[in-house]
Image (tube, coloured by chain):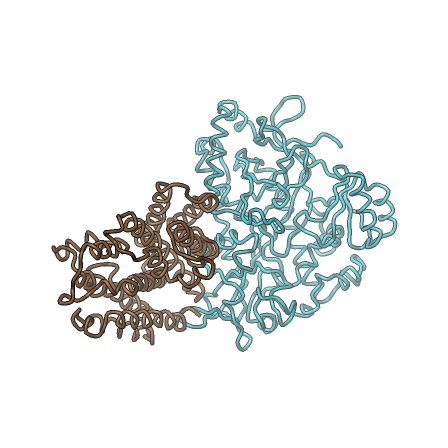
Chain colours: A cyan, B brown
Amino acid sequence: MAVAFDEMNIPGGDLRPAYQELARWLKETPPEALEYRRQEAELLFRRIGITFAVYGDSESTERLIPFDVIPRIMSGKEWTLLEKGLKQRVKALNMFLRDIYHGRDILRAEIVPDDLIFQNPVFRPEMNGQQVPHDVYVHIAGIDIVRVDAEDFIVLEDNARTPSGVSYMLENREIMMRLFPDLFARHRVAPVERYPDELLSALRSVAPHSASAEPTVALLTPGVYNSAYYEHSFLADKLGVELVEGRDLVVKNNEVFMRTTEGLKRVDVIYRRVDDDFIDPLTFRPDSVLGVPGLMSAYAAGNITLANAVGTGIADDKAIYSYMPDIVKFYLGEEPILKNVPTWRCREPKDLAYVLDNLGELVVKEVHGSGGYGMLIGPAATKATIEAFREKLKREPEGFIAQPTLALSTCPTCTASGLAPRHVDLRPFVLTGSKTTTIVPGGLTRVALKEGSLVVNSSQGGGTKDTWILDE
Amino acid sequence: MLSRTAENLYWLARYVERAEYLARTIDATLRVTALPATYIGKTNEWDSALLTAGVAESFYQTHEEANEHNVVDYLSFSAENPSSIRNCIEAARLNSRSVRTALTSEMWDTINSAWIELQEVWNKGTSTREELARFLRFVQETSLRFDGSAYRTMLRNDAYWFSRLGLHLERADNTARILDVKYHVLLPEEEHVGGPLDFYQWSSILRSVSALTAYHWVYRETLKPWLVADLLILNSTLPRSLASCYENLTRNLDQIGVAYGRQGPAQRHARGIRNRLEHSNMNDIFQHGVHEFIQEFIADNSRLGEIITKQYLI
């Protein structure tokens, strides 16, 4: 594998401009001081209770995501390009969803094969012909971006269902500003703190027409045992909206109400962090206790906005991903600004043959997997794992895609033996309201803390960093 | 506000109050049992501690006899006892997480730090008297800090009032339970034949509701059982007395009623209990029987809890 692109150091000893002040500061700061602040940061995270749960780990149900105090920095120019690309991509995702659940022009034009939609478990026939308020499907998108060189931004994954991580973007910044005021004084870092305000206005802007002039927004969480519960309560608090569970809501005459100490109160917009499958036991999984019986009929009657809409999974499915460049071109008539990772679709015999021949070099992902679970990283896997995967692939080729192992860019990171480069990705959050699309400058940088590791997922031992966009 | 949020705030306050009360009970029992037998007689004080905590029945399902070692463990650290201090703190933290948006950061920090700190105690227990004393003090301080943060940082709205309701309802229950267990040493003036034996019982009762010093300031008297009863039941200047708890309960319920523009059975029921306390004197109560009076009160108090739940929390 080629040497990864380092975001701070240019081979030969020079520094990229965005990192020059940081490098100077690092030289002036003794390593003990850095270590001391690192411990302080960890204490703060634990006291604030910023924890997440790891499924299938009974040892400790609440864990901290390791936080690396060295910020990841991008220039304003880089951000401008990325921002443009993200807006283009999310616009296309929304148009694609509207089309799939209505006219299906893209299928007739044979850009995307029919069976990939109709045989896909995340396609929701309930949404066929259903009008969603203001035609917005993906109100909150988390687009995972990686870099392999100084020029391009590459989309690794679109998250159009219930993307999480934004609380870390906000809290990381808070903690960095508390711990390193001097470092901030030496940079002009674009602020991220208006995210909750932007989110609230986006959510209110998409209220259904039957809502009052002051629509009521609520955040629907699966509850305290969900791995992202901290984020749900954090956001509800910052938004100033009620954090509701399924049992707090009730549907009457196709309207949604929450049970309050003063009786029932109508809800107009639900920022839901519960998956489609669990949202309404009358429509989807009947065993779900997290949802609200009748919610889908209120939705069909146009009395409630769900953000994100039901059925958006069909747009961020890994099998659809490989068609995204064509999707952008089809709806917008533009060249995609953000690149895709070259992807082999194992459902196609030619691609499958190639993948089977080159398993040792490729990353193979389950089409419906997420969180870094159930994937094969060829170069890091043992022979036995590869062979086991080969059998799985042959049995169910349509369940997988494969990609080359990318040399993700690296950033300097605190390690046991001092600063060292570690691989990173970036998840910016794109908000789409009824009229505007906004992105706060920054996002969540995830870092693979193990040397050489490319897996940044928190469930697999990844950490996070504060992400700085310089305002030049 | 969401009914579930109100419910969580209400229970959160109850759990914290209960944890403090348990810590006080253990503390007071340790003191009394440290006295030579001639001062306290043959009663098993650890058995009384279980009774005042309301867990005697479940305790004896798994234990033969009550002694310092197993009762301290059962009331403090036991994961099996649903109202051990440990489970109260765990439940308080879980409730806090569920209603983080309704708590101020100071309140959350109090519960969360205590929870983090106590993990080690749960794992190791306390091996010396000194460690145990430190633990009991820590629990009481946590409750004080929590109460103080609520008082100083919460908006004065329904969230605050529901949390106060939980606190005072639990407090009234706790005070009543002590009286229920110890009523036999609280005799009316004319029947009193107390000796040194009872003196320590009375001071222990006062200690467990942090009212020993208060007693002397209120009555400027040596300990008299009927005055101890008067202080704990009828004296509304003592924050842990039944009268004071009901002054607060009616006030908080009225505040909710005004804010919501509607009164209901909870307001009426609380006012009824308060009236009865206001119009009673110790002579009547002794005539009627302290035990019966307290038993009625406990039933009425828990009935109020059910009514509040039905009216607001579900």
Asked whether A371 or B119 is in front, the reply is: B119
Please indicate whether residue A453 sits to the left or right of residue B108 in the image. right
| Residue drawn at 62 percent across, 60 percent down | A275
Q: Residue furthest bottom?
A: A253
Quarter residue A310 falls in: bottom right
Asked whether A67 or A309 is in front, the reply is: A67
Quarter residue B10 falls in: bottom left
Q: Is residue B153 above or below residue A154?
A: below
Counting from the top left corner in percent of width and height, residue B94 is at 47, 55
| Residue drawn at 61 percent across, 44 percent down | A458
Counting from the top left corner in percent of width and height, residue A106 is at 76, 60
Quarter residue A274 falls in: bottom right
Q: Is residue B103 above or below residue B113?
A: below
Counting from the top left corner in percent of width and height, residue A228 is at 56, 52
| Residue drawn at 61 percent across, 68 percent down | A280
| Residue drawn at 54 percent across, 56 percent down | A225
Q: In what quadrant of the picture does the N terminus of chain A appear?
A: top right
Q: How many marks?
A: 0
Counting from the top left corner in percent of width and height, residue A430 is at 59, 51
Asked whether A24 or A40 is in front, the reply is: A40
Asked whether A357 or B305 is in front, the reply is: B305
Please indicate whether residue B106 sits to the left or right of residue A93 in the image. left
